[in-house]
């Protein structure tokens, strides 16, 4: 009798569990989706289509978060954003996009970005609140963020960060750029893990959110030393349009997402990406707009100033070196003075200065 009673109780328990699994909503399989660039979904609002320029976005050097990139002899970082019209959007046929180019410093040891904001390698594309936190650009729960990303296959990673109703910074998992060409990236705000950043707690609180930034970092599993990414059609879409396309999620890292390690050589040749040194002293192209163009008149009073002892350091390693009175700051004069005694050293210094 006791055995039969226990069996009936066990059967009832299993039936109850099955009923709950059927009735209760299931957890989402993924938060970030990667789709062909030509796909569409109901658009709620456009944050930026990048057709008229990128001056609403702070240059990476002005955010206070830039870390782990090469710098030239004057301390200018090898990380910039500018407006690009060389690529056609496969969905709209338009050509305006935000281009982000960067070169990592190989002498700096990589560490995974910390939730509190510390990072060995980080580039931040920031849309300030006066531009992002406006009625026409706000969004909230039940919606999704969408952006077209032209990848370079470099293995670098990026993530999207928003400010929630409590003004806390909450981000998507890291997305590895394993593709080349245009891809459509979707972050469904109601699904999967949310990763807190700086003051964030991993929860999207409140009803009124606004866009904050795109973060880019390396990947310890293997990343090229430089990269060029293009962003277009940053907008808010209806979650109903996401659910209809929820297929295989994009490879992500961070939170509950995981991706198998991929071996990508740091010497991988990237089409259209300048070699180390070329982007720091361009001869055939204008300087990045944050260096020389007066049209970006935003007052960035909190821009970090590079310590003077580093401003004329070696571009290759990021470490300072003595110049022994060389007024040019590149060691060529010292090499000429030492040419008689050590011609090999002179040739090496000249090659280093030329990049």
Image (cartoon, rainbow, N blue to C red):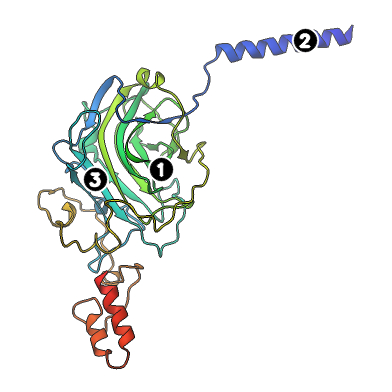
Residue on which the image places disc 3: 99
Q: Residue furthest bottom?
A: 341
**Quadrant placement of the N terminus:** top right
Measured as percent of width and height from the top left, residue 306 is found at: 27, 64
- The residue pinned by badge 2 equals 9
* Disc sitting over residue 293 in the figure: none
Name the image quarter holding residue 346.
bottom left
Query: Quick one: 220 or 203, which is closer to the camera?
Result: 220
Q: Taking 302 as reference, is 201 left or right?
A: right
Q: Looking at the rendering, which quadrant does residue 142 occupy?
A: top left
> In the image, is residue 236 above or below residue 244?
below
Q: Secondary structure at mark 3?
A: strand
Q: Could you tell me which secondary element the residue under label 1 belongs to?
A: loop
Do residues under tags 2 and 1 come within 8 Å of each other at their CB atoms? no
Residue denoted by label 1: 178
Closer to the camera in the image, 146 or 67: 146
Residue found at the far right of this picture: 1
The CA distance from mark 3 to mark 2 is 63 Å
For marks 3 and 1, give the CA distance. 18 Å
**Of the two numbered discs 3 and 2 in the rendering, the one whose residue sits closer to the viewer:** 3
Q: Are marks 3 and 1 in contact (CB under 8 Å)?
A: no
Q: Is residue 251 left or right of residue 282?
A: right
């Amino acid at each position: 009798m006791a055995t039969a009673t226990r069996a009936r109780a066990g059967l009832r328990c299993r039936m109850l569990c099955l009923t709950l699994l059927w009735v209760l909503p299931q957890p989402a399989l993924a938060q970030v989706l990667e789709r062909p660039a030509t796909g569409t979904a109901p658009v709620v609002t456009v944050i930026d289509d990048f057709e008229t320029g990128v001056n609403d976005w702070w240059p990476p050097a002005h955010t206070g978060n830039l870390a782990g990139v090469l710098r030239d002899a004057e301390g200018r970082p090898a990380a910039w954003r500018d407006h690009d019209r060389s690529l056609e959007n496969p969905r709209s046929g338009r050509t305006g996009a935000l281009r982000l180019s960067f070169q990592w410093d190989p002498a700096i040891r990589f560490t995974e970005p910390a939730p509190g904001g510390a990072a060995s390698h980080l580039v931040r594309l920031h849309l300030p609140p006066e531009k992002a936190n406006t009625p026409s650009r706000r969004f909230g729960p039940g919606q999704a963020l969408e952006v077209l990303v032209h990848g370079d296959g470099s293995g670098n990673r990026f993530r999207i960060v928003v400010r929630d109703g409590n003004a806390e910074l909450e981000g998507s998992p890291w997305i590895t750029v394993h593709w080349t060409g245009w891809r459509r990236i979707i972050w469904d705000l109601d699904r999967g893990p949310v990763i807190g950043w700086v003051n964030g707690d991993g929860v999207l609180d409140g009803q009124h959110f606004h866009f904050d930034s795109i973060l880019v970092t390396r990947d310890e599993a293997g990343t090229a030393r430089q990269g060029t990414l293009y962003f277009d059609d940053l907008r808010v879409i209806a979650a109903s349009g996401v659910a209809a396309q929820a297929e295989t999620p994009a490879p992500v890292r961070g939170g509950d997402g995981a991706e198998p390690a991929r071996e990508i050589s740091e010497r991988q040749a990237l089409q259209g990406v300048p070699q180390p040194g070329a982007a720091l002293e361009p001869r055939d192209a204008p300087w990045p707009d944050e260096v020389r163009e007066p049209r970006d008149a935003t007052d960035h009073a909190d821009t970090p100033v590079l310590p003077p002892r580093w401003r004329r350091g070696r571009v290759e390693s990021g470490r300072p070196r003595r110049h022994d009175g060389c007024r040019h700051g590149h060691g060529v004069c010292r090499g000429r003075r030492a040419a008689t005694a050590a011609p090999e050293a002179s040739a090496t210094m000249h090659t280093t200065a030329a990049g």
